[in-house]
Image (tube, rainbow, N blue to C red):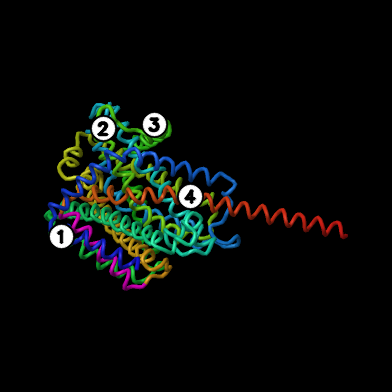
């Protein structure tokens, strides 16, 4: 039933966008305006609250609880586990925005900062750290932690609705639970389609920059079609073959590109950028987390921060389900620290290298990076890399990385959508996975046709709002379950102590 209802709703959106792309774009933009105007504050508060809640759980008395039975061992090694969660969690976005976002902020910084100044460059890097650092991984961790706890420790199904058992009881198996699962699937489908659309734009941009292939909707649809065939072939091979192999490949190629750019770029400048930006980010973390501009009526926060928070929330059921699936046997403390801290640090290094290199080229070498970002944002990375020694080789490596990230994200999402729509099955059928794989790609095509990058951003923000509310209640449900487990554990310890006391008296 969940599969059919979700399928009908998603197909309805696809048909609406395909039949009348202009009306679809206009309607989505109207809903977007209402969402950002009336609920921007809500996105900011819940994203910050999720991060605080995760940190609290890690260092509380619940931190030593295992996500599984007490004697369960982790299913995957740390390097493999990390590469799988990182590939699913960030993927294409890091490569797409690595150059484009810092340069965009440099020319059009937040309110109160003058563009193309030293202050603007510093603010650009600080906000990039903010958008790609602790907050998104805190959002992912909420879903993943809840699912892993209930699935592996309590024996529940691998469904978002299963995490609400402490609040809803048997009602999780009724219409309320089905509604939660349907909303999870819709948020996942549109969140992943947004990422696939971004990846398609950048693959087209790379092919255009390197080989002169035209940037057009026709080419983009062709790219999606080819990649769809590839990721569906991978998806049908299972988790331990296709996704595991692709995730490890992604990490190796990403680290290779990162190291080459660091060595061939302005190395000392990049280390300085990382150090100073990290200090500025930590120093301004709270103020950035709760920053809105009600008195100036500026739209910078809506266009950037709210888009990102909504994008991460829309991705959360997909990434959270996937991370939970590969995290059995970790303690809550180990899980939170690894899931939030390690990927954040790698994101900081990534943006320091690529964003720092782009800003150095723009500010000190007068390279036209800013012009490229304003003209065609998808080509900015390739133009920046070509300014370095071995630039063409670096650009080709970057293109390969985008393609492998694209395949991994789509592959992982197909697996997760299959789980969510197959009653939490850890091994969904190929028929279900292929259905969702084709639909994901179709949504990406429709969003590209109905508004390009703007249409992709709009879809993710709108789809995320209902799921953000679900996540708030999920936190209360998880906390109630942990408190109940602690209460029962104390009761058992008291009973064991009394039993031991009686035995000693008898002796």
Mark 1 highlights which residue?
18
Asked whether residue 457 is drawn in magenta, I would say: no
Give the label on residue 338, or none: 4
**Dot 4: few (<14), some (14–19), or many (≥20) neighbours within 10 Å?**
some
Q: Magenta segment, which residues?
A: 429-449
* Residue 251 appears in view: no
Q: Residue at x 75, y 54 (%)?
A: 497
Instruction: Name the quadrant containing residue 272.
Output: top left
Q: Which mark is residue 109?
A: 2
Q: Position of residue 422 (x, y in %)?
A: 38, 68
Circle 3 Cα neighbour tier, 10 Å, few/some/many (<14 / 14–19 / ≥20): few
Judge by depth and name the residue closer to the eye, 272 or 338. 338
Q: Give the mark nearer the N terminus: 3 vs 4.
A: 3
Seen in the picture, residue 131 relative to 160 is either above or below; the reply is above
Q: Is residue 127 visible?
A: yes
**Secondary structure type for disc 3:** helix
Of marks 1 and 2, which one's residue comes earlier in the chain? 1
- Give the crowd class for mark 2: few <14, some 14-19, many >=20 residues within 10 Å: many
Helix or strand or loop: what does disc 1 sit on? Answer: helix
Front of the two marks 3 and 4:
3
Marker disc for residue 427? none
Which of pointers 1 and 2 indicates the residue nearer the eye? 1
Asked if the residues shown at circle 1 and circle 2 are in contact, with their CB atoms under 8 angstroms apart, the answer is no
The reply to whether callout 3 and callout 4 are in contact (CB within 8 Å) is no
Going from the N terminus, do you reach mark 3 or mark 1 first?
Answer: 1
Whole-angstrom CA distance, mark 3 to mark 4, is: 25 Å
Residue 504 placement, left or right of 431? right
Tell which circle, 4 or 2, labels the residue nearer the N-terminal end. Answer: 2
Task: Kindly report the distance in space between the C-alpha atoms of the residues bearing marks 1 and 2.
Answer: 36 Å
Marks 2/3: CA distance? 16 Å
Judging by the rendered image, the residue that carries numbered circle 3 is: 287
């Amino acid at each position: 039933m969940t599969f059919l209802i979700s399928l009908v709703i998603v197909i309805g959106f696809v048909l609406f966008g395909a039949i009348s792309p202009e009306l679809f774009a206009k309607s989505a933009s109207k809903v977007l305006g209402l969402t950002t105007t009336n609920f921007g504050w809500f996105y900011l508060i819940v994203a910050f609250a999720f991060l605080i809640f995760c940190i609290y759980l890690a260092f509380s008395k619940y931190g030593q609880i295992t996500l599984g039975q007490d004697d369960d061992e982790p299913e995957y090694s740390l390097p493999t586990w990390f590469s799988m969660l990182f590939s699913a969690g960030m993927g294409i976005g890091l490569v797409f925005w690595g150059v484009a976002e810092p340069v965009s902020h440099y020319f059009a910084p937040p309110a109160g900062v003058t563009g193309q100044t030293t202050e603007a460059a510093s603010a650009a890097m600080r906000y990039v750290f903010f958008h790609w650092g602790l907050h998104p991984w805190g959002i992912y961790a909420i879903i993943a932690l809840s699912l892993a706890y209930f699935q592996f420790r309590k024996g529940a199904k691998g469904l978002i609705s299963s995490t609400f058992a402490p609040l809803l009881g048997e009602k999780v198996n009724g219409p309320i639970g089905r509604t939660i699962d349907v909303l999870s699937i819709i948020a996942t489908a549109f969140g992943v389609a947004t990422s696939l659309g971004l990846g398609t734009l950048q693959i087209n941009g790379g092919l255009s920059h390197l080989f002169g292939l035209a940037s057009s909707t026709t080419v983009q649809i062709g790219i999606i079609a080819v990649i769809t065939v590839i990721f569906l072939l991978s998806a049908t091979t299972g988790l331990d073959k296709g996704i595991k192999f692709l995730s490890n490949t992604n990490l190796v190629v990403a680290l290779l590109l990162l190291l080459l750019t660091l060595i061939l770029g302005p190395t000392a400048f990049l280390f300085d950028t990382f150090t100073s930006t990290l200090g500025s980010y930590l120093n301004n973390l709270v103020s950035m987390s709760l920053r809105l501009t009600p008195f100036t009526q500026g739209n910078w926060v809506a266009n950037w921060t709210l888009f990102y928070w909504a994008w991460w929330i829309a991705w959360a059921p997909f990434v959270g389900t996937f991370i939970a699936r590969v995290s059995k046997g970790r303690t809550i403390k180990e899980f939170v620290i690894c899931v939030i801290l390690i990927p954040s640090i790698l994101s900081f290094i990534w943006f320091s290298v690529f964003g720092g290199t782009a800003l150095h080229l723009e500010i000190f070498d007068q390279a036209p990076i800013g012009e490229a970002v304003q003209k065609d944002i998808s080509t900015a990375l390739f133009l920046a890399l070509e300014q370095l020694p071995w630039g063409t080789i670096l650009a080709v490596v970057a293109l390969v990385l985008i393609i492998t990230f694209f395949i991994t994200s789509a592959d992982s999402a197909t697996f997760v959508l299959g789980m969510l729509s197959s009653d939490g099955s850890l091994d969904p059928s190929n028929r279900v996975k292929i259905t969702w794989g084709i639909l994901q790609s179709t949504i990406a095509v429709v969003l590209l046709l109905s508004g390009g990058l703007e249409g992709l951003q709009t879809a993710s923000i709108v789809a995320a709002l209902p799921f953000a509310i679900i996540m708030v209640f999920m936190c209360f449900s998880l906390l109630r379950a942990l408190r109940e487990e602690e209460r029962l554990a104390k009761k058992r310890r008291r009973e064991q102590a009394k039993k031991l006391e009686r035995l000693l008296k008898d002796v």
